[in-house]
Image (spheres, coloured by chain):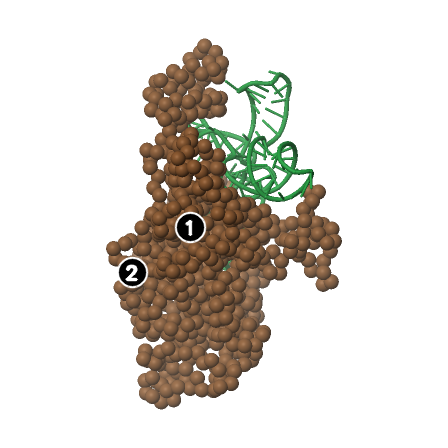
Chain colours: A brown, B green
Amino acid sequence: MTRYSAAEIESKWQEAWDKANTFKAERDETRPKYYVLEMFPYPSGKLHMGHVRNYTMGDVIARYKMSTGHNVLHPMGFDAFGMPAENAAMAIGGHPKDWTYSNIDTMVEQMKPLGLSLDWSRMFATCDVEYYGQQQALFLDMLDKDLVYRKNAIVNWDPVDMTVLANEQVEGGRGWRSGALVERRELTQWFFKISDMSEDLLSSLDDLENWPAKVRLMQENWIGKSRGLQFGFERVDGQEPITVYTTRPDTLMGASFVGISPDHPISKELEQNNPELAEFLTECRKGGTTEEAIETAPKLGYDTGISVKHPLNPDWELPVWIANFILMDYGTGAIFACPAHDQRDLDFCRKYDLPVIETFQSLDNPKPVETDAFVPAKSEKVKWINHFADLDEATGEDAINITVDFAEKAGWGQGVTKYRLRDWGLSRQRYWGCPIPVVHCEKCGVVPEKKENLPIELPYDEGGKPIDFTIPGNPLDRHPTWRDCACPSCGGPGQRETDTMDTFVDSSWYFARFTAPRAETPTNMADAEYWMNVDQYIGGIEHAILHLLYSRFFARAMNITGHLPEKSNEPFNALFTQGMVTHAIYKNAERTDENGRAIYHYPNEVEERDGGTFAKETGEKITVIPSAKMSKSKNNVVDPLAIIDSYGADTARWFVLSDSPPERDVEWTASGAEASFKHLNRVWMLCDKIAAMNPDAKGQGDDDLLRETHKAIRDVTLGIESFGFNAAIAKLYGFTNILAKSKAGAAAQKQAIKTLAQLMSPMTPHLAEDIWAYQGGEGLVTNAPWPVADEAMLVEADVTLPIQINGKRRGEITVPKDMAKEEVEKLVLAHDAVIRTLDGAQPKKLIVVPGRIVNVVV
RNA sequence: GCGGGCGUGAUGGAAUGGUAGACAUACCAGACUUAAAAUCUGUUGGGCCUUGUGCCCGUGUGGGUUCGAGUCCCACCGCCCGCACCA
């Protein structure tokens, strides 16, 4: 054996796995299946360390499950539609399709050296016509089952990407991708009826025990269920009542005015003959939706002159105001304001000189409301001043329920449940996406395409000429021939829908497609029945809402349309959200560039000396910002390929798993990577040393080594099963150190290093294969059954018990493991430290926890 | 504002209510070497002196439960994340 050469052994074993078809997944009803999936990447063209960490974690699980007798499905693909390809076409010319496929090729080439246990035969990209054609079929089936519909709606318009965005894709009033301020536009769009499933999507979260509580909570908040009272305010002029929704019906006696949204039908009607109002409404609608804009935006109001009657007292008239803070798309777009117990309403009433009526006060500290509204905590008891229904002692939830019941019995209102979740608008005015398979016909209206006409393929060019992506807008809209087609219903002239689907549609069912990636239908039920659900899904927390909520909706929709079994309504049995790979940023502390911007140095341009960090060339002082997200503009990106070149994939894999718990960020450090490499070298040398031992040589401590081996098996197994990869690796370090120092005989050491290779194989599979083969292991270590810790082996004959005096460690005794409690007590009382402390007295109490600890209370 | 999470050495981090700081980094010292690198060995929470198998303190702060608390409970401080004119 020579020096550890990662490059040599890694390609050697990758070829061996390929040749043996080790990772090809085939349906096999005789074995338990295990489906492990990492969120598939967007083909940006470059693999980054985050990918490496994500896929390595999945690989550890996949390889571990393989050795525990599971039939493992571990596929990989690409989420390949989307704006960056079109932006590249705009910026550097060329075609989004060419750009995308060339990136995919590059990334596959970059992924292969990692030695992942992927079934590459199942690979697909969502921009493959075979994939999006099936997506179109799925869309038609969903249309058939009323899960998709078209409506005119006020939508979020991204003026930079020139497309519509779903609510979920607007972050702080800006487009999630472009960062542009989103505008409001009224357009006819396609929508998925996700809001119909609000209750199921919410209540089913309770069963997702193996999802992070945080993600479940985020989804719960996003779906936003609230129970309240809906009722009408009679208009004094006798016109249609104004319906309002409130979650605080118990404050109805504190009503000050009725407020309606600027987009409310009444506002729109009044606007027609009132130029002053029209101007006010324009002002309201213009208002930015950024966080700052919202926080600083003044409360604007306009008195409509309409009066309504209080439902509990027809003589009590309230004015109707239009207020800029009332949203049309929540509740009914109309509210009653209770300024005494809502800060926003109070601000408004103070500004427009409207009355403030208290319904209750604090029990502990009763005082009239002045500039701060009194909003008690849910459980806080209050003193009622002004109320209806039987509220004497009631507070919070109880008060709400009592008043809802009261209104229902009296017949003027109903308790209703509302959800914040809106339907998912899927139309995008972009080229590089899945065409929506419908035709607009003058005679027949909107007609679904016939399934036999699928796939509706994206045109590559414009009648033989390249598409010009530099012209703003959607090239499909101006395409000379693609747009025109025959109506699938009457055969007359029609026009294709030129909108394409949101790329989140593509990623909402790819996990199902992986179970039968070449099927002639979206899925194949037999394969779906066998492989679904995903047993372990791994990805970033950034998808906690969008992707995961959409996928849960799609799984349900695919069950309704007969493409997935009902058990897959929740498609991901377990979810793990991994942290990022970060890296320090080296910022020049002495100067900026000519534009006043900070200068960031590459890691190799700085050095540490004299307790500080300095630029190598100029000696300038450097500010080190630890653990920051890797970013090209900050010059702190570590290229996985460079690491693989200098250390090998096993080192990169080992490093990204060590040190930090998987759910937390891990900081990439040169010293850490170096240390990982050194350790793998050490293991390699150890293997060499053990192989060179005289096979007949007897040693000392064979039993101890065997016991340590079984402890390592137990701890590493537990670590892998509980996503404690960092802990598992720490145990492997410990076990390696023990083995290196062991004086045991050749046979015992050989057995120990073979087990070490097995335990390391999920993390560093290439090195493990090489050691396994070198020590004469049978076949591939990848296929070898996982070692099992023998409980009997773990028990030592003697145990060392710490002796505590009043809870503080004061000494220890070593006793046979099954010594009787009374015997232990005698020995403890005879211990020097105990005798010294007791000084002849009797202890108050003597606690012996067998095998663990002894505590003497004096 | 609402909801959630986290505070442990110089650093990343270990600890089913039972010996706090595993494992690793960094630092320091030693061995090998002409020297350096590599490798190996050892030390490293703070303090005290009487240098011991010693004592005291120590997991953000203050209290509580317990024979025993980093871990459980209460309050506070600090940091991080998600949502947010949602009635």
- Bin the neighbour count of mark 2 within 10 Å (Cα to Cα): few under 14, some 14-19, many 20 and up: some
Residue A232 in the image: state x and y as whole percent: 39, 64
> Does A831 sit above or below residue A519?
above
Q: Residue at x 32, y 67 (%)?
A: A523
The secondary element bearing badge 2 is classed as loop
Q: Residue at x 44, y 42 (%)?
A: A691
The secondary element bearing badge 1 is classed as helix
From the image, tell me which residue sits under label 2.
A27
Residue A71's quadrant in the figure? bottom left
From the image, tell me which residue sits under label 1.
A769
Q: Is A310 in front, or is A329?
A: A329
Residue type, mark 1 in image = Glu
Q: Are marks 2 and 1 on the same chain?
A: yes
Q: Is residue A439 visible?
A: yes
Residue A151 in the image: state x and y as whole percent: 40, 74
Q: Residue at x 74, y 51 (%)?
A: A619
Residue type, mark 2 in image = Arg
Q: Is B46 in front, or is A334?
A: B46
Left or right: A607 in relation to A115: right
Kindly identify which chain the residue marked by label 2 belongs to: A
Report the number of numbered marks: 2
